[in-house]
Image (tube, rainbow, N blue to C red):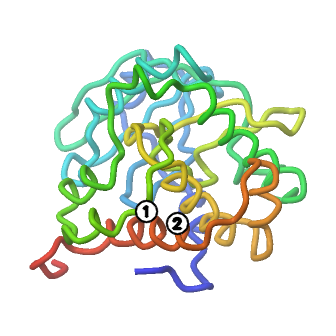
Amino acid sequence: MTPSPEYRPLADQLDVAELVVPAWVTEVASGTSAHAVWRNELGGVTYSVENGRRYLKAQSADTGWDLDAEVSRLAWVTGFVPAPRVLASGQREDLRWLLTAGLPGRSAVQRPWIDRAATTVPALGRALRRFHDRVPTASCPFSWSVADRVTRFGLPAALVDDAPALDPVVCHGDACNPNFLVGAEGEGCGYVDLGNLGVGDRWADLAPALMSLGWNYGTGWERAFLNAYGIDPDPAKQAFYTQLWNAEDEPPTGQTPA
């Protein structure tokens, strides 16, 4: 289901000032200071530890977060691009958690970058292009193919037959704007939330990245992003991979929402 034009996820995701840091988070953080900085759409919370020297992500085990997949992908991709280094991971009752080393920069949807779209949007396009250029497909052991996504999310098999010709890269897997870090000079400097990383079509990243621009910066920024990335618009591929992205949020075939 395509979000409405009024869809604005940041309102809830950044509204974390009232969240109390659980005692176990302080324990995992070795007794040092921690505070919540982000809440994702599945209720997972990210805590900054020691003012960003480390980050701890905690999320319910029943949300489908594959912690092992994220750990293995981070261990592999840090050899090619700046991504969080895994320090520890585990499970606490019904919560899975991941502790990583901090990276320089701030999320592209935090201030000041959320207020500087003319700078941030081209930086996001260049950052995604660097990711696609630098992470090697030949040695990547992970997949983000249409076929694997259809199987994983219980989607109609016809999507595999309908898939456009493949232009393979190693995809970020969740190339929405919040998952890119921007440094003090206004350029992308890091990548986070890489649990879906794998080989797929570059438009599997470009489509959600473009959709995310409207949620975070308003309409009219797609051309600036694509120009900075260095690619012409491809309406057919964008439509297909947008449809695939949105379908993953719907109940599997034959099921209804709980």
Q: Tell me where residue 141 sits by quadrant.
A: top left
Residue 214 in percent (x, y) is at: 68, 72
- Identify the residue at image location x=19%, y=67%: 157
Residue 243 in percent (x, y) is at: 42, 73
Instruction: Report the amino acid beneath label 1.
Output: Pro
Residue 56 in percent (x, y) is at: 45, 31
On the rendered image, what quadrant is the C terminus found in? bottom left
Q: Residue furthest front?
A: 165
On the rendered image, what quadrant is the N terminus found in? bottom left
User: Residue 164's mark?
Assistant: 1
Q: Is residue 128 above or below residue 51?
A: below
Disc 2 packing (10 Å; few <14; some 14–19; many ≥20): many
Q: Which circle's residue, 1 or 2, is located before the other in the chain?
A: 1
Q: Cβ–Cβ below 8 Å for labels 1 and 2?
A: yes
- Identify the residue at image location x=43%, y=23%: 138
- Identify the residue at image location x=70%, y=54%: 109
Instruction: Report the amino acid beneath label 2.
Output: Lys
Q: CA distance from mark 1 to mark 2?
A: 7 Å
User: With 100 as the anchor, is 134 left or right in this view?
Assistant: right
Q: Is residue 63 above or below residue 105?
A: below
List the residue tagged with mark 2. 237
Kindly state the secondary structure of the residue where label 1 is placed.
Answer: loop
